[in-house]
Every structure is written in structure tokens, then in C-alpha cells.
Amino acid sequence: MKKITRIKKNHRLIVFQKLVLTAAIIGFLSALLGNTLKKITEHYESIFFTLARQHWMLYLLFPILGFSIIYFLRQTLFRKKENKGIKEIYESTDSKTKHLPAYKVSSHFINGLITVIFGGSTGIEVSTVVASAAIGSVVQQKENLFKRYKTQLICAGIASGITALFGSPIAGLIFAYEVISRKWSRSFLLTNGVAVAVAFAFTYFVDNQPLFSINVLPWHLHALPYMILLGMIAGVNAVYLNRCVMLFKQKFAAIDKHHFRIIIGAGFVSLALILFPQLYGEGYHAVKELISQSGHFNLSLSFALTLLFVILLKPIVTSLTLVSGGDGGVFAPSLFIGAFLGLLTASVLNTYFNAGVLPVNFMVIGMAAMLSASIHAPFTALFLVCEAIGDYTLFFPILIVCLISKTTAKLIYPYTVYSYSRV
């Protein structure tokens, strides 16, 4: 009996040691992938966007060129399999037999990069998430001992990828739980905790700069009702974003010839970029520009209409990017729309209702509110945005507004782009 007990104890210790080591490897590889994709995308997006601003005809060329390259690569290198985003992760975690193949790492890395640098109006976040999940899946398949820990190790890759992009291990951990796993367990906390710790250490020494450089100002209680209003408006806009993506996917699925999808989608994306260059790529360049000038804007009719049209067009252009073959999701578009929505709301309140709210604070809160409502993950949005700006001054109002925006969105429409794929 003692011998059996000793064997069982040693077996648990071996499993524990292997899980820790495997999670650390997944964390490092996912952080390396996420950080590399982020840096390469930022570099080439800036170059291509500058060229397009100097030669407007490139706005017409870049989207069709990018979508065509992605289609060519799919047909020749990636087994003629279309990238499905988060749905691929659900298909793997919900099944005992399906796995994320190794080629999904390079597929999402390359396609995500090409999509954004050629003007596709989405971001690299979902590409990073799926590629990181594929790392976790591939590593898990190497050891029969880890069959029962499949979801935990996939989530470890996901959490590490988010950590690398935003420098927030808490956001990575909570995203893996809120959106993918939805189950806490000791093995989940162990594997994901080790992975994000390694990913954060890597990110801290390699890239310790927040995504957005913002001087957040102290908030006042009188602004809270207006912030709650912003949360409700963000909830409505999040439903509009998700419904746009679902509608365009449904309509474009009826088009058999893929080159028609590319021509139609790229044509509309190009036209939108000519009219509103802010929509180019992930759009963080436009958000940073707005942040730097948020204290100097006067609400003229042309400025208000520009903000409004960008907010309304972004979901449509994002949808067209995705249905034309682009790789991405609603992560970056949510942050983008939220910033513009926050600035527009603050400007209207200050101009017509003498509210005295701070536009820069509303931009930050708007980003969190839109992300929370779009993916139904309020705590992910809370920590992610606070880390993205490197400041927790607005922690409490962001928490309140994220919960309100998510509730508003769910009351109007119970699904997100992610959860609808599971129905």
C-alpha cells in the first residue's frame, strides 16, 4: 500500500513538474510570437500608411493586393484552409479529437501582418490569439500525459499572447477565462499563471512601453452619470459592430467565386480609406493622434460629422476586411471605435450641456466600454485598457462602465462574434 501511495505521489509530482515546464515554454514562445508580430506590424504599417498618404492611389492598390496575397498563400502554403479566428479555438477546445495544427501559427502570423499593413481595417490581436493557441495545442499534443490539460495549455498560449501585446498578465489571464475556458481549476491557474509570468518577464525586458501614451486626469463624481451614459451608448455600438460582421459574413458566403469577394470587399475598403484615412489598418495611429489633440478640439459641424462617420463606417469596413479574406477580429476595432465614441460623446456633452467632462478620460473609458460590450468580457477590458495606458486612475469608473456596456449589449443581443460561433 505504501509503495502504491509513493508511486501515485511521484506521478503527481512528475505531472506537476512537466506542466510547469511546458507552460513556461508555451509562455515564452507565445510572447516571442506576439511581440515580434506587434513590432513588425507597427513598423511596416507606418511605412505603408505614409506612402499611401503621399500617393492616394495606393489606397486603391493596397487592399486588393493584400487580400490577393493572403488568398494565394492559402491556396499554396496553408492547405486551402480559411482562417476562422476564435472559432478555430472553440472547435479545438470543444472536441477531444480536433486540434489546432502547427501551420496555424505561421498562417495567422503572416496573414494578420499582411492584412493590417496593406490597410485591412482590423488588428493583429485575434491573429496573435489563435497563433498562440496553436502553440499551446501543438505542445500539448507532444505528450500523452497532457490530453486532459488540452484547454488549459491552449489558454496558456492565449493568455501569453495577450500579455505580450498589451503588457498585462492579468488581462491575458482573465481573457483566457472569460472568453475561452469559462472554468477555473487548479491546473488552469497553474499553467496560465506560469505562462503569463514568463510572458510578462519577457515583455518587461524587451518592450516595456504602454500602447498609448496618455496623461489621464483625475475624475470627479459629477462625471459618473455621463460615463454611465457613454457605457450604454457603447453597448449599442458594440451590437452594431457584431451584427455587421455577422451580416456581411452571411451575405458574402453566398458568393462562390473568391476573387469576386476580394474585388467587392477591397473596392469598398479602398473607397473608405480614401475618404477616411483614419480607418487604415488597426487605426491606433488615429487614436494616438486624437489623444494628443483631445484638449484642443472645438466641436464644429465638420469635426462632429467626421467622428460620427468614422464610428459608423469602421464596423462595415472591418466586416468587409474579414469577409474578403483578411485575418483579424473585433478586438482592435472595438478599441478604435471606443476612443472616437468617447471623444464625440464628451464633446457633445461639453458643448451643448455644459457637462465639464474631460475628453481624454472619456476616450479611455470609451475604449474599455466598447471592448467589454463587443466580446462580453468586462474584466479583460478593464485591466487591458488600464495597462495599455499605463495608468489605473480611472479603474473604478472603467469597471462600472464596462459592466454597464456589457449588460446593455447583452440585453439588446445576447451573442458576440465569438459566442455566436458556438451556437
Image: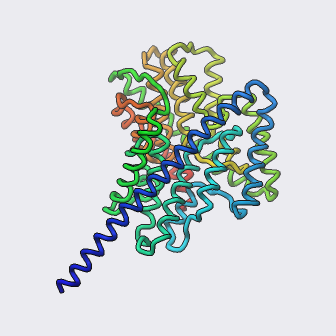
Q: Residue furthest front?
A: 205
Total numbered labels placed on residues in the image: 0
Q: Quadrant of residue 396?
A: top left
Residue 322 is left or right of residue 154, and the answer is right
Residue most extreme to the bottom:
1
- Taking 255 as reference, is 136 left or right? left
Residue drawn at the location 48% of the way across and 43% of the way down: 373
**Residue 130 image offset from top left, x and y in percent:** 55, 55
- Position of residue 285 relative to residue 117, above or below, is above
Of residues 343 and 100, the one drawn nearer to the viewer in this rendering? 100
Q: Is residue 413 above or below residue 340?
A: below
At horizontal 57% and vertical 51% (from top left) the residue drawn is: 417
Residue 347: x %, y % from top left: 52, 19
User: The C terminus is located in which quarter?
Assistant: bottom right
Tell me the residue at 37%/45% (across/down): 170
Q: Quadrant of residue 61?
A: top right
What coloring was used for the rendering?
A: rainbow
Quadrant (top left, top right, bottom left, bottom right) of the N terminus: bottom left
Q: Position of residue 366 (x, y in %)?
A: 48, 32
- Residue drawn at (47%, 55%) of the image: 157
Left or right, 400 with respect to 118, comes to: left
Above or below, 129 relative to 212:
below
**Residue 316 shows in the view:** no
Identify which residue, 189 or 399, lies in the foreground.
Answer: 189
Q: Nearer the viewer, residue 38 or 304?
A: 38
Of residues 400 and 10, the one nearer the viewer is 10
Q: Is residue 320 visible?
A: yes
Give residue 199's position: percent from left, percent from top. Answer: 43, 48
Q: Residue furthest left?
A: 2
